[in-house]
Image (cartoon, rainbow, N blue to C red):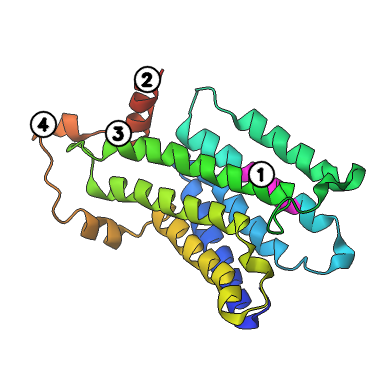
């Protein structure tokens, strides 16, 4: 990400979205957003650690970032249910240690290292569980439209981020191809903000055609957490 303008935009997005998510996480109902806010804050700091002399700080920070992402996936989608989070964290610890003890820390294919591969797996896991929730919500008329859109956005940004870790676009010297990675990163950042920090005006717009199928106010008083808990019961 050598273009100073693109780098500056990414830094502003990461810091700004991190602040927004942190403020939302102050609400006990959204305490899980602390993990996602940490992902943005740490990624912001990571942009200052590009000097090779600082190694292994960037490597360690990247591992911590993805452990925070794994914990966000776990606390958001699994709530009191077993998940592969321990395996994901263990995988990051192992691939993080490889460069120090063996030659296996080098590229596997297309310049993709074991750490890149592990990062992609983490994002694809995030996309998979979001897709599973979306698949169950999409035909449920009692669920507000903006909630369905949220999970569509999660699937989109998580898939995009996973693909970016597998493609050699970061290492290309061709100007157009070389922009795919940074631009894709900015798109992913914006989608993450829209999914988890969605402005109230956008929620109202997405719900403009929504008509609840019941009129009983008590039946409508269902939170998103209630929905996730019910989906987890059904999946057991």
Whole-angstrom CA distance, mark 1 to mark 4, is 47 Å
Who comes first in sequence, dot 1 or dot 3? 1
The chief SS type of the magenta part is helix
Q: CA distance from mark 1 to mark 3?
A: 28 Å
Which is more foreground, mark 3 or mark 2? 3
Mark 2 vs mark 4, CA separation in Å: 24 Å
Q: Mark 4: give few (<14), some (14-19) or many (20+) Cα within 10 Å.
A: few
Disc 1: CA contacts within 10 A as few (<14), some (14-19) or many (>=20): many
N-terminal of the two: label 3 or label 4? 3
Q: Earlier in the sequence, mark 1 or mark 2?
A: 1
**Mark 3 vs 4: CB contact within 8 A:** no
Q: Residues within 10 Å of mark 3 (few under 14, many from 20)?
A: few
Residue ID at (46%, 51%): 24
Q: Nearer the viewer, mark 1 or mark 3?
A: 1
Return the residue at label 1: 118
Q: Is residue 26 above or below residue 135?
A: below
Reading the image, the residue beneath label 3 is: 136
Question: Secondary structure beneath disc 1?
Answer: helix
Residue 42 visible somewhere in the drawing? yes
Mark seen at residue 216: 4
The residue most toward the left is 215
Q: Which residue is located at x 51 percent, y 46 percent?
A: 33
Q: Magenta residues?
A: 61-68
**Viewer-side label of 3, 4:** 3
Secondary structure category for the residue under label 2: helix
Q: Secondary structure at mark 3?
A: helix
Residue hosting label 2: 233
Say whether residue 65 is magenta. yes
Mark before the other along the chain sequence, 3 or 2 = 3
Label 2 packing within 10 angstroms: few (<14), some (14-19), many (20+): few
Tag 1–tag 4 contact (CB < 8 Å): no
């Amino acid at each position: 990400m050598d273009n100073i303008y693109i780098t500056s935009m990414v830094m502003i997005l990461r810091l700004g979205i991190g602040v927004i998510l942190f403020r939302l996480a102050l609400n006990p109902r959204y305490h899980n957003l602390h993990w996602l806010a940490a992902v943005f804050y740490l990624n912001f700091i990571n942009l200052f650690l590009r000097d090779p002399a600082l190694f292994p700080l960037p490597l360690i920070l990247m591992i911590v970032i993805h452990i925070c992402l794994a914990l966000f996936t776990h606390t958001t989608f699994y709530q009191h249910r077993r998940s592969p989070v321990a395996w994901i964290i263990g995988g990051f610890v192992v691939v993080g240690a490889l460069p120090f003890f063996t030659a296996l820390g080098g590229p596997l294919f297309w310049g993709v290292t074991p750490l890149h591969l592990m990062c992609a797996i983490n994002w694809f896991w995030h996309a998979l569980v979001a897709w599973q929730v979306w698949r169950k919500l999409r035909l449920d008329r009692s669920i507000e439209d903006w909630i369905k859109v949220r999970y569509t956005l999660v699937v989109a940004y998580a898939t995009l981020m996973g693909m970016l870790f597998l493609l050699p676009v970061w290492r290309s010297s061709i100007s157009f191809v070389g922009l795919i990675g940074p631009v894709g990163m900015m798109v992913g950042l914006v989608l993450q903000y829209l999914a988890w920090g969605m402005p109230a005006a956008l929620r109202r717009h997405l719900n403009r055609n929504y008509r609840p199928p019941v009129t009983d106010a008590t039946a409508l008083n269902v939170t998103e957490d209630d929905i996730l808990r019910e989906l987890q019961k059904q999946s057991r």
